[in-house]
Every structure is written in C-alpha cells, then in structure tokens.
Image (cartoon, grey):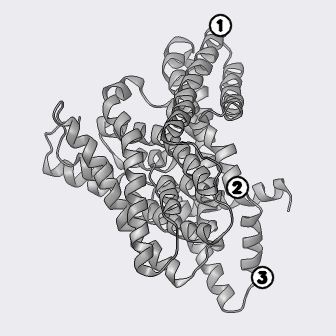
Amino acid sequence: MSLFDTAAILVSLAALFSYLNYRFLNIPTTIGIMLISLVLSLGLLILNALGLEELELQAERLVRGVDFYDTLMEGMLSFLLFAGALHINLEDLRKQKYVITLLATFGVLASTFLVGSLAWLIFNALGVDLPFIYCLLFGALISPTDPIAVLGVLRSAGVVKSLESKIAGESLFNDGIGVVVFMIVLGLASGQHTTGPGGIAMLLLQEAGGGALFGLLSGLAVFYLLRSIDNYTVEILLTLALVMGGYALATELHLSGPIAMVVAGLVIGNHGRWMAMSETTIAHLDSFWELVDEILNAVLFVLIGLEVLLLNFQVEYMLAAIAIIPAVLLARLISVGAPVTLLRRFRQFSPGVIPILTWGGLRGGISVALALSIPAGAEREVILAMTYAVVVFSILVQGMTIESVVNGYARRSPDSHLS
C-alpha cells in the first residue's frame, strides 16, 4: 500500500469518525474519534475470533504499514506542539513559572522512579520477568502528560485560566523533558549509554536546555522576518518553515525538538502576534494552525484506536495493565502533590488544585509512540500493553470526567481564586 493510499484511508476514517461523533455522541472530538476507532478495532478482533479474518488482517496490515513512532515523533509532533504553544499567553505562563518548572522537571523524574518501582513490584507479584531498568523505561514514557490530549480536552472542560495555564504549560514542557529522560533510560537499557550520573545530567541539560535556547533563537529570527513584511501567505509560510526546518535541525544537532517547538511557538504566538503581524495575518495564521491542529489530532487519535490490533493479549500482560493504572495515578498524585505542597509556603492555592492536576494529567499518543520505539522483544510487548491500557483509561475515563471534577470543586468553593 502506497503512502498516499495509507494517508487517504486514515484521513477518510478521521473525517467519518468526526462526523459520527458530532452527529451522535457529541463528546470532545479527540475522545470521540478514539472511542469509535477503538470500538472498530475491538469489533474486528471479535470477527477474527469468529473466523472472519480478512477484515482484521487488512486493518492490521494498514496499521503495521504506519510507523507510529516516526509518524508522530518525526512528523506530527512538531506541528502539534507549535500549534498548541501558539495560543498560550506568555504572561499567564510567567505567573505559573515555578509550578510549571517543578512539575515539568521534578514531577517527571519523581514519577519515573515511582511508576518504575511500582511496576516492578506488580510484575514480581504476577510472575512477569521484567528487569528494573525496563520498569524505569515504562515510568519514563508514561510520566509526562501529553499536550496533544490535554489541550484538546481543556478546550471543552471550562477550566479557569490560571489552572489551565498550569496544566497546559506543564504538558507542553514535560513532554520534551519526558522524551529526553526516556531516550537516556533506553540507552542505559540497551547498553548504548555507559556514562555515570554526571554525564547523564549533562546530556539532559544539553538536550533540554539546548532545545529551549535553539527554539528561542529560531523563533526570534522568524519574528524579525515577520516584522519586516506584511503578507499573510509569506508569513504563514515562514512559520511553516520554522516548524519543519527548526524541528529537523534541532534533531540533527541532538537537541530536544519538542522543547524547541514549544519555545518557538510561544515567541511567535506572543511577540510575533502583537509586534509583527497585522490583524489580517493574525486571523489567517490562527485559522491555518487551528486547522492543521484539528486534522492531525483527528488522524492521530484514529491511529491510537487502531493500534489495539497490534497488542499481545496474554493474561499476565492484561492483569499487569489493569493493575498499573492506579499505580500511575498514585505516582501522579505524589509527583504533583509534593511541588504544590512545597509552594504553598509562598503562594495561595485554592482547594482541589492537586486532584484536578492529578486527574487532568492525560497520557496520549506520545507515550504509545515511545513504547513502540522500544526494540522488539518480550519487554516491548508487556510495556506496550501497559502503556495502551493507561492511555485508553486516561483519554476515555479521565478525559470524559475532568469537567465534572473541575465543576465539583468549583461548586464547593465558588468564590475561591485558583492561583
């Protein structure tokens, strides 16, 4: 099957599922698309079990023909992160800088070790032989919240601005940190990294700090180009070049492409928007990137739903997957609660901020992509099963109920200010 044929099928499915969701389910688009895609996949598996194998085989062939890791991490992710950061107000982000910094650094690292340790205990109890380093690898890929999933849900959840800035800012930055941590742990697991803690810390600083600096410089370079012209087609093309060329160059320089795109998006979405663009350009730029965001999100969540066709349904793996969901939530609660509790000495937080941040920390396609990037073997199969279980629970259950959680705390303290 050619690349065009594969893309045509996925876009067609995304369009059909979007229509069905809008017409009959009327739930957030990304959640609805994934739910319908998941139901389709389970239906094909049932037909396969009944002896009607052809449809399931064709669908599996389609899914195997798409390299999920390359498609997301080397293709979609740069566009999605830039589009998400483009609409984040930098001043709102500055007000939450200490919370976001702690959650995106300490939170990710603490959650990695907590999830890894809990997973190791669960595996031992179930008799699944998974080395501790691979448990940490699972902790690294599942700990960062997914900005793609989070931002999609926040649009319809009615979260107050200050709390939305915390959740969105954390998800945009801890995504890049999480990918770097994952690559370091994967290198240790495969024997590619043999350096000590100092070398690992320098590598983390190079990837994350270098990515942020590269994103700032590339964003400012395009900002000055935008300020010198007034033609929305050329200006949109410049932002497109920033995303595609910037991400490719950052990766080539061994810098964090995701962090670079977040920083570049913040520069263009704030300084660029107010100091370098006309009202006409702003309207066209926003429409273009919102459309790119919606289309890629739709295709991505179709793929997430179809990936269930590739899972290994061993009983031990399924039991581990079910047991790991509360373990991940517990690790999230601790890794969020500790920084917020520390910062309560210096600032006020309204009731419910910790449970809302915990429940609003959705996992999505990035975790699945990282799991699929692990070299083939028994370790990959069990990690993929657990990752998929957490992602499905996160998007369907947490994503569908986060609005109720937010509204519940708002009703308890209607006059409180979430800071």
Which residue is pictured at 40% across the width and 73% down the height?
Answer: 122
Circles 3 and 1 in contact, beta carbons < 8 Å? no
Looking at the image, is 319 positioned above or below residue 49? Answer: above
Residue at disc 3, secondary structure: helix
Q: Mark 1, residues whose alpha carbon is within 10 Å: few (<14), some, or many (≥20)?
A: few
Query: x, y percentage for residue 292?
Result: 63, 40
Q: CA distance from mark 3 to mark 2?
A: 22 Å
Q: Quadrant of the C terminus?
A: top left
Residue, disc 1: 228
Label at residue 258: none
Q: Quadrant of residue 417?
A: top left
Which residue is pictured at 22% across the width and 35% down the height?
Answer: 343
Left or right position of 158 against 188: left
Which residue is pictured at 68% across the width and 56% down the height?
Answer: 68
Query: x, y percentage for residue 290?
Result: 57, 38
Residue at disc 1, secondary structure: loop
Residue, disc 3: 54
Q: CA distance from mark 1 to mark 2?
A: 37 Å
Q: Earlier in the sequence, mark 1 or mark 2?
A: 2
Looking at the image, is 318 positioned above or below residue 370? Answer: below
Which residue is pictured at 59% across the width and 56% down the height?
Answer: 189
Q: Amino acid at mark 3?
A: Glu
Q: Nearer the viewer, mark 3 or mark 2?
A: 3
Residue, disc 2: 11
Q: Amino acid at mark 2?
A: Val
Residue at disc 2, secondary structure: helix
